[in-house]
Amino acid sequence: MTTGNHQSGQLSNVEAVRLVAGREMSVRLRSKAFLILLGITAVAFLAVPIITKLAASGPKTEHVAVVQADAEYGRQLEGLAGKLHQKVAVTVVADQAAGTAAVRDGKADAFVVSHGANGTQVTVEKSLPDSLQTLFSFAGAAEQGPPPASQQVHATTLEKTDPQQGQKIAIAITAGLLMYLILMTVGQMVAQGVVEEKTSRVVELLLATIKPWQLLAGKVAGVAVVGAIQLVVPGVLGLAVGMADGQLSVSLSASVGSLLWTLAWFAAGFWLYAMIFASAGAMVSRQEDLGGVMAPIMMPLIAGWVVAISILPGNPQSGLGEILSFVPLTAPVLMPMRWALGVAPVWQVLVALALTLACGVLVLRFAGRIYRNSVLRSGARVPLREALKAA
Amino acid sequence: MSDRRLEVDALTKRYGDTVALDGMSFDVRAGEIFGFVGSNGAGKTTTMRIILGVLAADGGEVRWDGVPVDHETRSRIGYMPEERGLYPRMKVGEQLTYLARLHGLGAAEAAQAVRSWTERLGVHARFGDEVQKLSLGNQQRVQLAAALVHNPEILVLDEPFSGLDPVAVDVMSQVLREKAAEGIPVIFSSHQLDLVERLCDRVGIVRAGTMVACDTVERLQASGGEELLVHAPAAAEDWASGLLGVTVRGRENGRTVLALAEGADDQAVLAAALATGPVTEFARRRSSLTELFRHVVSAETHTGETASTGETGK
């Protein structure tokens, strides 16, 4: 702060940017739109794990398949399940092949291949549910008679998968979705903020006091903080709930790591998109005209997200995904997802981040020029060629 | 009163093929109220924007106290843009405080200045209301407060009186006089020439981006020469048009307004009037500023108009 002497006059660059950013934040953080959006995302991120949990718990019936020879064992299982307050339905299948097929088709959760002194062999599709694990080990023990040592249960999975793959995909999609939504909303916030200042003509009063780049930087910084809050609050809530009820067993450090990477990407992606959105906003004079100039900017963002959601979960190694995760305009959505999926080595993340930041610096030059050339012109949309003209 | 001056020196500005300013020069002394008049598109707003650095001039210079005006000086100018601009959804008090802070005032100082100016301008009751909820007149008062909260050294006001009710006009006039009395150069543009005549120490008339007349109100009026006001009810429309050294300036409430060239005989005019029938009024008067303005601005109207179209609103 400058000392408050009466004709203290000029602000330093930092103070000017800070004042503009402060106004931007205080207006936006108090706006109903922000609070509603934050509420919705927070509730959504709280609700998803809770709903999944509710759906998963409850007295769900596990289906177990046995061959004809083991029909008696099957009845034992059912009886034991009753004592354990579990619901187990046993189906008798013709042979081993039919049992495996039943598991593969999802008709049975587990197929008992063999049981006896050497432990119990079961086939499952992905993993053996905890409840069945308990059941099989007790049943085996009862069979042997005392001493009732718990019985070894060997589960063979049909699908060779990373046991954490599901969670990784969930985190990746969450990260990608957050990036996409936040870049989209805060980008539009910047553009609308610029147009609002143009429409209300307050920009002339502001530019008579501070420099165009100070106004632009302050606005972008203010909106960035608002966007970061919108990213961190649901992110932390989602992680907390997910880990509290044990659905996410990915370690805390890995989750926090994902969140931090996402934040770093948010910073880089936002920087890039905010500059572009701000110049788009400066080129029009009315909110109604904004859609036209924003559409081409949103295209790469949307395209990146479409690729991300349609290809990456099924095929994390996708070549298209890898290429697009290096392209500055799509990287902010794709690279955090590939990182969360564990398919992007650190060097790739760093290179893509550097590329995005470099692109941001380049865009800053042009955005600053477009902004300066256009922001005081009202009326028709300023043609890009004129907006880019050196001052 | 100090002898500091705001000098506008040979400003030029083109927008593509149209010339907005063509060697605009004048100066405003500290403690002086300077009226800036001219038809729409003559270059008033462009000049003011260049003074504030909102627009860059193609050539020429603006100096304050002999030194070219820079960003630092500009933060000490109070400015009211032609197109009013405030954040519509921001509260009056917060908005003014923000603008004061942007001009370099500390938090406490800004709050104090905002309080006193909203009270002075009669909008303190609306302190916590959003600007868009205020009447146009009150928005205008807030706009003036925005130009004054940082205790500026120079005032540049683009049409401060447009859209004001008579009470607000009086408040505004009084504020401008007070500010001038404090030794601040005040420059404002207006189309209300009676107001300009009443308020200003000096007046500059612009046409097509150039200052065509710039002097005290009295001297400008004197330069316009004297007019004859003749009321001859029975006379035909063009009764005076053939008279030597006489120009018909127009009609006013049934009276004919005539300008006399140097040495023209007013008695001959009276005789001509009497020849048409009874003459109920025959008077001499000094040209009004309005008349002078019309005369100055309409000269070479054609070049003036074409050169200045397209300037407004940029």
Image (cartoon, coloured by chain):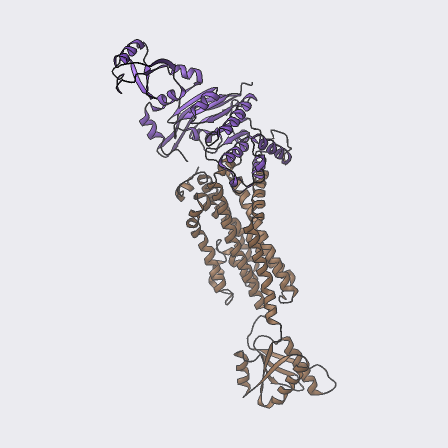
Q: Position of residue B181 (x, y in %)?
A: 55, 21
Front residue of A138/B309: it is B309
Image quadrant in which you'd find residue A94: bottom right
Q: Position of residue A41 (x, y in %)?
A: 56, 57
Q: Position of residue B256 (x, y in %)?
A: 32, 18
Front residue of A129/B305: it is B305
State the residue lying farthest toward the bottom.
A69
Front residue of B313/A325: it is B313
Q: Colour of chain B?
A: purple
For the point 49% across and 63% down, the residue is A309
Image quadrant holding the N terminus of chain B, namely top right
- Note whether B160 is above or below B30 in the view shown: below
B235 lies left or right of A206: left
- Note whether B219 is above or below A207 in the view shown: above
- Note whether A388 is above or below A91 in the view shown: above
Residue B68 visible, this orientation: no
A157 lies left or right of A194: right
Residue A271 visible, this orientation: yes
B252 lies left or right of A322: left
State the residue lying farthest toward the right.
A147
Q: How many marks?
A: 0
The brown one among the chains is A
Image quadrant in which you'd find residue B273: top left
Q: Position of residue A338 (x, y in %)?
A: 54, 61
